[in-house]
Image (cartoon, rainbow, N blue to C red):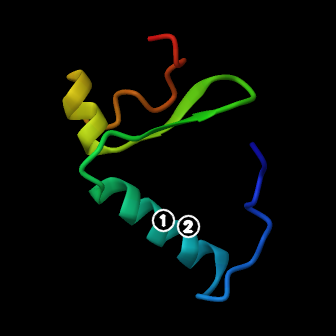
Amino acid sequence: MRDVSAHGSSAGTPADAGSLSTDILRHVSGGIVLVRASDALVVFANPAFERMRGYAPDELVGQHVSI
């Protein structure tokens, strides 16, 4: 795993690219969860993953991956 957040984007500012990425992840039909490697906390879970696992929207964010 490598941190690519400092890299620029030819499609616009990094903030625009991050917003587009988040929008895409939210609309993917498959479940996606992103976990921060340093402390194993959930930083993002898309609605499909929340539905698959029975969690309310944003209930997982900030929780340890062991839940």
| Residue 29 falls left or right of residue 21 | left
User: Pointers 2 and 1 in contact (CB under 8 A)?
Assistant: yes
Determine crowd level at label 1: few under 14, some 14-19, many 20+ residues with C-alpha closer than 10 A: few
In what quadrant of the picture does the C terminus appear? top left
Q: Is 24 above or below relative to 60?
A: below
How far across and down, in percent of the image, does residue 61 sit? 45, 32
Q: Is 17 above or below relative to 26?
A: below
Residue drawn at point x = 75 percent, y = 28 percent: 38
Residue under pointer 1: 21
Residue under pointer 2: 18
Residue drawn at point x = 38 percent, y = 64 percent: 23
The answer to whether residue 55 is visible is no
Q: In the rendered structure, which amino acid carries the disc numbered 1? A: Ser
Q: Is label 2 in a helix, a strand or a loop? A: helix
Quadrant position of residue 58: top left
Q: Is label 1 in a helix, a strand or a loop? A: helix
| Residue 16 falls left or right of residue 33 | right
Residue drawn at point x = 32 percent, y = 39 percent: 31
The answer to whether residue 6 is visible is yes
| Residue 15 falls left or right of residue 53 | right
Residue drawn at point x = 52 percent, y = 19 percent: 65
Cα–Cα span, label 2 and label 1: 5 Å
How far across and down, in percent of the image, does residue 35 sit? 57, 33
In what quadrant of the picture does the N terminus appear? top right
Q: Residue 66 carries which label?
A: none
Q: Is 46 above or below relative to 25?
A: above
Front position in the image: 23 or 31: 31
| Residue 48 falls left or right of residue 18 | left
Q: In the rendered structure, which amino acid carries the disc numbered 2? A: Gly
Quadrant position of residue 26: bottom left
